[in-house]
Image (cartoon, helix red, strand yellow):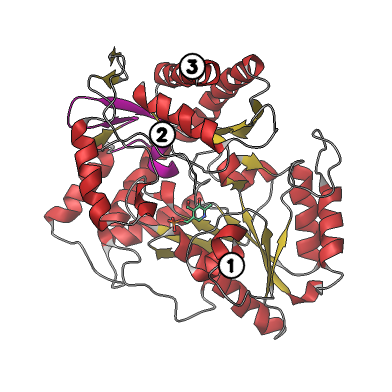
């Protein structure tokens, strides 16, 4: 992915002891380096792209190793632990299931799954009354793709086209990768599906219709993109449009007027709208589902990650007519009872602890702080984008104006040395997404660590 390699030699760093962070050893500690060396003997490099922080336990918004260090988690693992790591209610619910014991029941009925599916549908928009449970996000995408095409073919054998967006992430299995817009990851595919089409993402830097950095990318951009596409593709051949609720790597949201134009066109041409809420759902953006920002109700919603805050469970939600369209839908671990127990407890906590409105409130604080930092480093921070508790700083090289992935890696590595943990997007953004329950004080402290790291790396390398 990136050419920068994180340091794997224990380095002496300043000791830190605050209420929220502890750095008491060299970073990375020798023990971590030894473990990484051992794992690297057996695992692919792709499993060693993230910062060298050994997770021994994780609780709330903090990650602990075995030698006494503790980091503030600014990435919720990988935007998963919306209610925080190891929430007592989730632990209890898992424990109760384990104690029975019940750790597997395939799709034979269970009490816990009955409660979970009822809860998911109660939390979903009214007209979406069916939910199919799976394990990973990518499976949810595959399922939505299959449903779209079976549904489309029922009206017209040629209605199998899928539209999605350049740069979008929908998963890593074959169908999901083809629907997604990450061109670099598709080199091995061979024959590309001619019925999958990608529109430019409506953000000035990425949109061919934008002439200036401040261009609005409104409904007009959608109309132009669709006119361009429909020169070679008939609207009647399109079954569905997949929308990643925000572009993950950059926390980039669509302009509302763009989505409204898209919705009008989709309705006119009887095309399903599928929202990929796998990263965005369950409070992350300050709404229960991120599509609410666009005042739209999708036909199908794909969920994962924050639906359980840690155990592998995903879901495809839609109208009965759609979800029931394929009688062959099933998967060995879909609706696993331990995962269902975690998900049910997770959804209850999101409501009981008002985490959706908390994400919205804290997002306002976070945005203000990030804009303040941008004003200090306007040559390096091109944009601050996001909503709720998902934000991104877009980092550029002031000379070339290109996105600077190496500068990003150096900054997040320095953050790690100071007790703040972030993930690598590999695309020139510093992405911030702490658990929604993070205390304000820890959020501010994390941002001040980030600011310190930016200052040190920009000024001294
Ligand atoms: C928007 C989106 N869709 C799909 C996926 C794939 O989910 P999973 O890794 O659980 O297969 C991801 C994962 O990062 C995602 O962010």
Q: Label 3 belongs to which residue? A: 456
Q: Position of residue 353 (x, y in %)?
A: 40, 32
Judged by depth in the image, the label closer to the viewer, 2 or 1, is: 1
Q: Label 2 belongs to which residue? A: 435
Measure the C-alpha gap from mark 2 to mark 1.
31 Å
First-in-chain label (2 vs 1): 1
Q: Position of residue 131 (x, y in %)?
A: 47, 63
Q: Label 3, secondary structure: give it.
A: helix
Residue 178 numbered tag: 1
Q: Position of residue 424 (x, y in %)?
A: 47, 40
Judged by depth in the image, the label closer to the viewer, 3 or 1, is: 3
Judged by depth in the image, the label closer to the viewer, 3 or 2, is: 3
Corner quadrant of residue 255: top right
- Badge 3 vs badge 2, beta-carbon distance below 8 Å: no
Question: For this rendering, which residue is in front, 393 or 403?
Answer: 403
Residue 319 numbered tag: none
Can residue 80 be seen here?
no
Label count reads: 3
What's drawn in magenta, residue-wise? 60-85
Residue 138 lies in the magenta-colored region: no
Q: Is residue 103 left or right of residue 373?
A: left
Q: Is the residue marked by circle 2 packed among few (<14), some (14-19), or many (20+) residues within 10 Å?
A: many
Q: Is residue 25 above or below residue 337?
A: above
Identity of the residue drawn at 59% across and 39% down: 251
Q: Is the residue marked by circle 3 packed among few (<14), some (14-19), or many (20+) residues within 10 Å?
A: few
Q: Residue furthest bottom?
A: 157
Q: Is residue 353 above or below residue 441?
A: below
Q: Is the residue marked by circle 1 packed among few (<14), some (14-19), or many (20+) residues within 10 Å?
A: many
Question: For this rendering, which residue is in front, 226 or 2?
Answer: 2
Residue 81 lies in the magenta-colored region: yes
Q: Label 2, secondary structure: give it.
A: loop
Q: Is residue 217 left or right of residue 191?
A: right
């Amino acid at each position: 992915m990136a050419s920068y390699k994180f340091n794997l030699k224990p380095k002496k760093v300043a000791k830190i002891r605050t209420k929220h962070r502890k750095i008491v050893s060299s970073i990375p500690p020798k023990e971590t380096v030894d473990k990484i060396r051992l794992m690297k003997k057996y695992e692919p490099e792709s499993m060693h792209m993230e910062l060298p922080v050994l997770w021994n336990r994780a609780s709330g918004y903090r990650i602990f190793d075995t030698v006494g260090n503790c980091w503030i988690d600014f990435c919720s693992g990988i935007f998963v632990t919306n209610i925080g790591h190891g929430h007592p209610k989730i632990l209890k619910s898992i424990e109760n299931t384990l104690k029975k014991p019940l750790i597997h029941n395939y799709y034979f009925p269970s009490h816990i799954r009955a409660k979970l599916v009822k809860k998911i549908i109660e939390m979903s928009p009214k007209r979406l009354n069916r939910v199919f449970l799976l394990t990973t996000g990518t499976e949810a995408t595959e399922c939505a793709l299959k449903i779209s095409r079976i549904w489309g073919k029922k009206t017209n054998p040629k209605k199998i086209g899928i539209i999605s967006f350049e740069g979008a992430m929908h998963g890593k299995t074959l169908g999901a990768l083809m629907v997604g817009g990450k061109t670099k990851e598709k080199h091995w595919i061979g024959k590309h599906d001619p019925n999958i089409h990608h529109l430019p993402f409506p953000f000035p830097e990425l949109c061919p219709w934008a002439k200036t950095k401040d261009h609005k990318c409104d409904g007009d951009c959608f109309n132009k993109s669709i006119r361009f596409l429909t020169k070679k593709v008939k609207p009647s051949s399109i079954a569905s449009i997949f929308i990643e609720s925000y572009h993950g790597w950059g926390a980039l949201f669509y302009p509302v007027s763009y989505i409204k134009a898209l919705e009008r066109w989709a309705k006119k041409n009887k095309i399903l709208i599928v929202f990929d809420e796998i990263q965005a759902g369950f409070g992350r953006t300050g709404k229960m589902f991120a599509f609410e920002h666009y005042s739209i109700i999708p036909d199908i919603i794909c969920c994962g990650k924050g639906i359980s805050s840690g155990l592998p469970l995903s879901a495809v939600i839609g109208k009965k007519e759609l979800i029931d369209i394929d009688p062959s839908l099933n998967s060995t671990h879909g609706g696993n009872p331990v995962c269902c127990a975690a998900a049910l407890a997770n959804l209850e906590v999101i409501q009981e602890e008002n985490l959706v409105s908390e994400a919205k409130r804290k997002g306002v604080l976070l945005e203000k702080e990030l804009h303040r930092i941008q004003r200090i480093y306007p040559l390096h921070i091109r944009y601050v984008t996001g909503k709720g508790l998902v934000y991104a700083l877009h980092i550029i090289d002031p000379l070339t104006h290109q996105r600077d992935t190496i500068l990003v890696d150096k900054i997040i590595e320095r953050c790690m040395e100071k007790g703040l943990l972030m993930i690598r997007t590999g695309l020139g953004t510093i992405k911030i997404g702490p658990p929604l329950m993070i205390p304000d004080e820890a959020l501010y402290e994390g941002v001040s660590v980030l600011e310190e790291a930016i200052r040190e790396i920009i000024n001294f390398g």
